[in-house]
């Protein structure tokens, strides 16, 4: 019997502390859920007296994790993942108008400020509740966030997770698990057509044909965290956080390319501009919005990325291809600021008052 994958459910919840499973759960529609238990099955080394076949096997360790791809609804629950993946939150009330709040997710002040979440996935069975299955992962870190923006397209997001302890739940069914929310509707998904990419911030929008924003949190690995006496990783500690952008420029003029190669130099008497060893930096902003305004308001749902100082390089020179048109990919990486939380912002505008992490 074929079982429809679309009957599955995925959700998350904030943990008050490491080792404490979430008590409030939020669900979100998803496109691809590749999430669950990971285990390492290992084999005995070749032994004298064992011939030329394997003589034994054992499970070395287990953990949980994977990825979830979705079209992000900005109405509410996606903010929990942004919080856990960035590390810190500052709310700007009644912005851009009364009743709408801007949630600014930023880097943490310290590595130990990163949040723990729980994940769970409902897997439907062939005959209903008798063979439904749930998978639960406790002590999860949001290791990556990636947002893909393109014209004539909704924004697409993918989140990467790594967790300490996985469980299977045989009592799970589509009605037994309780959720704190109903599914959010499609109206709050932002579009690449609304907004713009600005480099530097405050300039005229660049002609970008696509952009990918990645917030990557590098944690200690499951293997590094193994200890004697436990099958599960002991912890996951933040080691590095990177905010980067890849975008494609629909060629208009040489200004940006000139900045990156020659630091904005000017020609000599022969018109030649000398290469410069100076790295080009600028501020950066990318804004996307929902198609319509939030019901009852004059402003839309809004997703914004900002960094005050990013280094830029082009992925090669402008490439001319017969029958094509000129475009050039650029890559930018945010540099750390003296105030750590100012390194980058991820802003979400919605009606939620705040995301108050349980303690």
Image (spheres, rainbow, N blue to C red):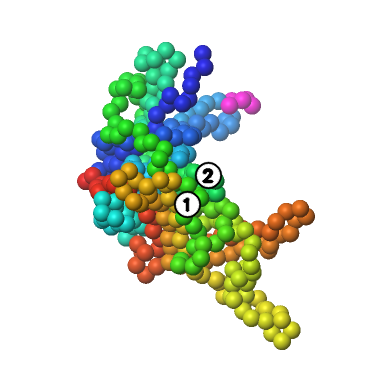
Neighbor class of circle 2 (other Cα within 10 Å; few <14, some 14-19, many 20+) is few
Q: Which mark is residue 194?
A: 1
Q: State whether residue 97 appears in this view.
A: yes
Query: Which image quadrant for residue 251?
Result: bottom right
Is 51 magenta? The answer is: yes
**In this rendering, which labeled residue sits more in front, label 2 or label 1?**
1
Judge by depth and name the residue closer to the eye, 200 or 20. 200
Q: Is residue 226 left or right of residue 250?
A: left
Of mark 2 and mark 1, the one earlier in the sequence is 2
Q: Which mark is residue 153?
A: 2
Judge by depth and name the residue closer to the eye, 272 or 102. 102
Neighbor class of circle 1 (other Cα within 10 Å; few <14, some 14-19, many 20+) is some
Judge by depth and name the residue closer to the eye, 205 or 296. 296
**Residue 220 location, x and y as percent?**
42, 49
Magenta range: 50-54
Q: State whether residue 60 appears in this view.
A: no
**Residue 181 location, x and y as percent?**
30, 34
**Residue 102 location, x and y as percent?**
32, 54
Magenta span: predominant SS is: loop
Q: Is residue 4 left or right of residue 94?
A: right
């Amino acid at each position: 019997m074929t079982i429809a994958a679309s009957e599955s459910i995925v959700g998350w919840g904030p943990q008050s502390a490491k080792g404490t499973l979430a008590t409030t759960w939020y669900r979100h529609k998803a496109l691809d859920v590749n999430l669950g238990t990971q285990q390492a099955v290992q084999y005995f080394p070749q032994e004298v007296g064992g011939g030329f076949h394997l003589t034994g096997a054992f499970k070395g360790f287990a953990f949980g994790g994977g990825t979830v791809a979705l079209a992000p609804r900005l109405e509410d629950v996606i903010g929990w993942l942004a919080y856990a993946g960035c590390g810190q939150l500052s709310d700007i009330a009644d912005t851009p108008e009364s009743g709408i709040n801007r949630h600014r997710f930023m880097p943490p002040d310290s590595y130990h400020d990163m949040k723990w979440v729980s994940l769970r996935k409902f897997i439907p069975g062939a005959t209903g509740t008798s063979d439904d299955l749930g998978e639960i992962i406790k002590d999860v870190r949001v290791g990556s966030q990636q947002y893909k923006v393109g014209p004539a397209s909704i924004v697409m997001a993918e989140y990467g997770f790594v967790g300490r302890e996985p469980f299977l739940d045989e009592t799970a069914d589509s009605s037994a698990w309780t959720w704190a929310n109903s599914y959010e509707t499609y109206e709050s998904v932002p579009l690449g057509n609304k907004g713009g990419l600005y480099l530097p911030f405050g300039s005229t929008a660049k002609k970008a044909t696509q952009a990918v924003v990645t917030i990557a949190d590098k944690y200690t690995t499951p293997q590094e965290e193994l200890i004697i006496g436990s099958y599960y990783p002991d912890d996951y500690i933040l080691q590095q956080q990177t905010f980067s952008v890849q975008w494609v420029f629909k060629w208009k003029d040489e200004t940006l390319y000139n900045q990156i190669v020659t630091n904005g130099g000017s020609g000599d008497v022969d018109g030649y501009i000398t290469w410069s060893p100076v790295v080009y930096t600028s501020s950066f902003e990318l804004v996307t919005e929902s198609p319509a305004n939030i019901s009852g308001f004059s402003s839309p749902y809004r997703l914004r990325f900002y960094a005050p100082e990013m280094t830029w390089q082009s992925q090669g020179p402008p490439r001319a291809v017969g029958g094509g048109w000129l475009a050039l990919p650029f890559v930018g990486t945010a540099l750390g600021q003296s105030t750590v939380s100012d390194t980058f912002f991820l802003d979400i505008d919605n009606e939620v008052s705040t995301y108050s992490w349980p303690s």
